[in-house]
Image (spheres, rainbow, N blue to C red):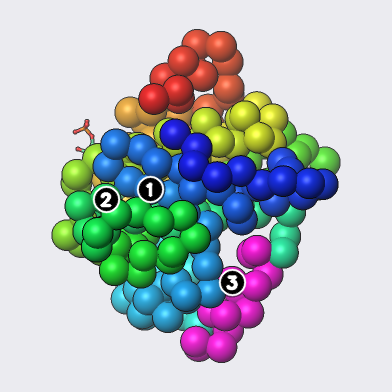
Amino acid sequence: MELEEASGEDKGQRKSLETSLEGKKVVLVPYMREHVPRYHEWMQDPALLLATGSEPLTLDQEYQMHLSWTQDPNKHTFILLDKELIAGSFVHGDPHVEAMVGDVNIYMNDPDDLQTAEIEIMIAEPKSRGKGLGEESVLMMMTFAVENYGIQKFCAKIGDSNAASLHLFRKLGYVDASYSEVFKEVTLELPVTEQSFKILVI
Ligand SMILES: CC(C)(COP(=O)(O)OP(=O)(O)OC[C@H]1O[C@@H](n2cnc3c(N)ncnc32)[C@H](O)[C@@H]1OP(=O)(O)O)[C@@H](O)C(=O)NCCC(=O)NCCS
């Protein structure tokens, strides 16, 4: 369910900055400045840095990163709220830091092919893993990306030891497309067809 929509000329391009999406188990909210300190705490964990292929940043650098992500029209990020952890009722525009458990993002990183998006998912809070939040969030993000940005193919780059993530994406129909010996990383792809889009609309 879409709760709020962007308006004016930004519609479409920066919609992820204005929209909250409610699923059965998660609410996806825009990545706000208020989320940065908790996000920064997560990204001190060596296991999460490894799983997401990230470098540790200072808090200042994390604020800069937040700014760059929110200003780049080819990157779209949502923070995941675990609905079981929301204090009171969900309010659009409230960061609900108490319930933030991870993020999902897409990145159209090939300027010659803006219809292909790399997708990443992270459930940073261990207590919220294994409850279906990752799967629901990926499906919601894919639906949002197809409907708002005309994405026709998704890819995911996953470390070959990351069994949970590999299982999740293969379950959703992604197939192995290539393997990098250097990065020990599998690239999985899913073209958007009429058939694959049917599983997206949840
Ligand atoms: C990998 C991750 C995104 C999965 O999200 P999640 O919410 O925990 O997973 P879900 O509950 O939605 O489960 C989806 C599927 O993956 C499977 N799965 C989840 N955790 C698993 C694990 N540790 N090992 C094997 N399979 C696992 C589930 O069983 C389910 O498949 P099933 O329905 O066939 O049983 C999450 O655990 C995570 O972020 N981990 C750390 C960071 C990371 O690795 N990010 C990926 C970088 S792209």
- Residue identifier under label 1: 27
Residue span colored magenta: 58-70
State yes or no: residue 63 in magenta.
yes
Q: Is residue 192 visible?
A: yes
Amino acid type at image mark 1: Val
Q: Which mark is residue 66?
A: 3
Mark 2 → mark 1, Cα distance in angstroms: 7 Å
What secondary structure is the stretch in magenta mostly built from? helix
Amino acid type at image mark 3: His
Numbered disc in front, either 3 or 1: 1
Within-10-Å neighbours for mark 3: few <14, some 14–19, many 20+: some
Up the image or down, 75 lies above or below 193; here it is: below
User: What kind of element bears circle 3?
Assistant: helix
- Rendering coords of residue 112 (x, y %): 82, 41
Mark 3 → mark 1, Cα distance in angstroms: 20 Å
State yes or no: residue 35 in magenta.
no
- Rendering coords of residue 119 (x, y %): 52, 45
Query: Could you tell which of marks 3 and 2 lies nearer the N-terminus?
Result: 3
Asked if disc 2 and disc 1 are in contact, CB closer than 8 Å, the reply is yes
Q: Nearer the viewer, residue 137 or 190?
A: 137
